[in-house]
Amino acid sequence: PDLLEMDPIEFEGLVAALFRARGMHAVTTQRSNDGGVDVEAMDPDPISGGKIIVQVKRYRNTVPPSAVRDLYGTVQGAGANKGVLVTTSGFGPGSYTFAEGKP
């Protein structure tokens, strides 16, 4: 499907299905008051697993560093092991610089 034309809720559902296909338990969150979380996933691996916060961005333009900073804050606030930002676009150098050394 054309991901940029896909309904936003369906796109989040697709991302959750991808995490489930990797053997994780994954659910989409409520649309309102989700605290910046689109999908919550739990990786059952006893060594590298844990709670994963996922943000989904259907962007045509580069994802701004502010979105990466917001995700990091959400991950810290939720006590998750890691955060994943899934996008139809890409990331600029500022996003990579901020993310360096973070889970």
Image (cartoon, rainbow, N blue to C red):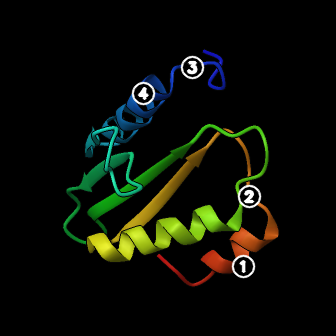
Q: Quadrant of residue 69?
A: bottom right
Write the residue at 29% across / 42% down: 29
- Closer to the N terminus: mark 2 or mark 4? 4
- Residue 28 as seen in the image, left or right of residue 7: left
Write the residue at 23% across / 61% down: 45
Residue labelled with disc 4: 9
Query: Quick one: SS at disc 1?
Result: helix
What amino acid is labelled 2 in the image? Phe
Disc number for residue 91? 2
Q: Could you tell me residue 31's position as x and y percent?
A: 34, 38
Nearer the viewer's eye, disc 3 or disc 1?
3
What amino acid is labelled 4 in the image? Ile
- Closer to the N terminus: mark 2 or mark 3? 3
Residue labelled with disc 3: 6
- Closer to the N terminus: mark 3 or mark 1? 3
Above or below for 55 versus 67: above
Above or below for 40 versus 9: below
What amino acid is labelled 3 in the image? Met
- The Cα atoms of the two marked residues, 2 and 3, are separated by 21 Å
Q: Could you tell me residue 66's position as x and y percent?
A: 64, 67
Residue labelled with disc 1: 97
- Is disc 4 in contact with disc 1, using a CB cutoff of under 8 Å? no
